[in-house]
Image (cartoon, rainbow, N blue to C red):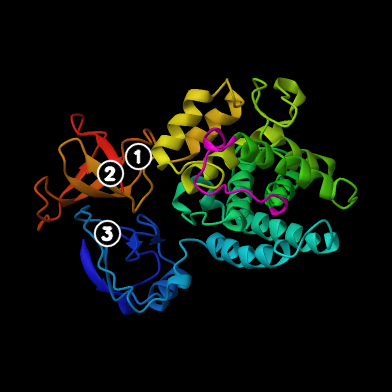
């Protein structure tokens, strides 16, 4: 291990730790062979020094980064996040004025779905780091972009056909367009906590969204079904028609899971949960509300504790997640930051929870 100025980095140097922003966002991942593009990205982000792996030592230490000079909007772990952020601005601008008219302009939104799909295909490493894309939903526009991104990645992981993937991207980015036509609070509010009147009104968003687009020939029928049925569940407990099982296409079932996951962790149409709580919810309802095959692949794809996430251990200590263990998504590698009494760690201490069998993560920030 050695500390290196970013100006002296060379191609194929291996980062010992991910470069993190002040907010914990992964800027460049650990164990990545650096390219000229990644080195330039680090320089542009204001990083001054990092620690790289020394093959002789095989020791990993923390990187040192100074991102104070990096603008927040430049902090993207992947080009996909930059694409998603730009797409959100376009989606917001169009949907804010869309009230059962301007349907031609919705084609622009579909083009954004294609851009997201193209970026995913061009940047395949995101398919294996799905929860390290941490563009948290703050409104229905970001939510639509996130569901499109998650759904596209999952469709690729499930090896769906090109046609299915394109239909999923188009349906997912428009799936909640019906929220533009209702006037009830739905941020950090679950349907079962709404008043009866508000719950009835809220559930109409699927029908409103579908009816606004049902005659548009440029939008595939499957995409329209995603808009109409994304709240249906395989046990018939969903809405608007209580369809179940085989009456729902795989594309619909896939977007339903991605929609629920992002809704739960962001509080869009749901009370906000932590990631591990949302994962547990999907796990419990796999085979009940959700297609078990799709749910299983989704659960294999997400990390309960993403890199950069602050966690609390069973010993009452505080740590940050620095790497994932592919064999166990709930047992990452963590770097300790605070003792149980609140005093900071002054030395670099890491634990691989696959080996520390008596230590558990009990909560996150």
Name which residue lies at 30% across and 57% down.
17
Left or right of 108 on screen, residue 294: left
Q: Residue at x 51, y 52 (%)?
A: 125
**Mark 1 — residue?**
325
The segment highlighted magenta reads: 180-195
Quarter of the image where the N terminus is located: bottom left
At 76% from the left and 47% from the top, the residue drawn is 209
Closer-to-camera residue (259/11): 259
Is disc 2 in contact with disc 1, using a CB cutoff of under 8 Å? yes
Instruction: Compare residues 318 and 103 and report the one nearer the observer.
Output: 103
In this figure, which residue is indicated by the disc labeled 3? 53
Left or right of 300 in this view: 84:
right
- The relative height of residue 288 versus residue 115 in the rendered view (above or below) is above
* Along the line of sight, the residue nearer the viewer: 152 or 4: 152
* Residue 303 appears left or right of 315: right
Which numbered circle lies on residue 242? none
Circle nearer the N terminus (2, 1): 1
In x, y percent, where is residue 178?
72, 48
Numbered badge on residue 333: 2
Disc 3 crowd rating (10 Å Cα; few below 14, some 14-19, many 20+) is many
């Amino acid at each position: 291990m050695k500390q290196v100025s970013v100006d002296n980095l060379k191609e194929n140097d291996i980062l010992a730790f991910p470069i993190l922003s002040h907010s914990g966002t992964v800027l460049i991942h650990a164990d990545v062979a650096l390219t000229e593009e990644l080195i330039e990205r680090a320089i542009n982000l204001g990083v001054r020094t990092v620690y790289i792996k020394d093959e002789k030592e095989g020791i990993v230490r923390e990187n040192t980064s100074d991102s104070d000079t990096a603008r927040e909007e430049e902090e993207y772990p992947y080009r996909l996040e930059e694409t998603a952020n730009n797409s959100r601005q376009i989606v917001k601008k169009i949907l804010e004025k869309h009230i059962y008219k301007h349907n031609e302009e919705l084609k622009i939104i579909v083009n954004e779905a294609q851009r997201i799909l193209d970026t995913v295909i061009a940047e395949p490493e995101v398919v294996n780091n799905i929860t390290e894309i941490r563009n948290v939903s703050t409104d229905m526009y970001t939510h639509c972009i996130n569901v499109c991104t998650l759904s596209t990645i999952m469709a690729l992981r499930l090896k769906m056909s090109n046609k299915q993937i394109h239909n999923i991207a188009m349906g997912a980015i428009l799936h909640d367009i019906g929220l533009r036509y209702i006037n009830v609070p739905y941020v950090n509010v679950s349907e079962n906590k709404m008043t009866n009147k508000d719950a009835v009104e809220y559930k109409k968003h699927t029908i409103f969204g579908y009816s606004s687009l049902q005659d548009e020939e440029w939008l595939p029928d499957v995409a329209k079904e995603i808009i109409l049925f994304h709240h249906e569940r395989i046990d018939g407990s969903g809405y608007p028609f209580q369809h179940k099982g085989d009456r729902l296409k795989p594309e619909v079932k896939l977007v339903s899971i991605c929609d629920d996951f992002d809704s739960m962790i962001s509080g869009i149409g749901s009370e906000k949960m932590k990631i591990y709580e949302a994962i547990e919810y999907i796990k419990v309802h796999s085979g009940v509300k959700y297609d078990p095959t799709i749910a299983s692949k989704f659960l294999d794809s997400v990390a309960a504790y993403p890199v950069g996430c602050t966690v609390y251990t069973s010993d009452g200590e505080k740590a940050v997640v620095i790497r994932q263990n592919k064999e166990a998504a709930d047992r990452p590698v963590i770097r300790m930051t605070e003792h149980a009494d609140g005093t900071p760690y002054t030395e670099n201490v890491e634990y691989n929870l696959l080996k520390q069998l008596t230590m558990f993560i009990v909560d996150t920030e």
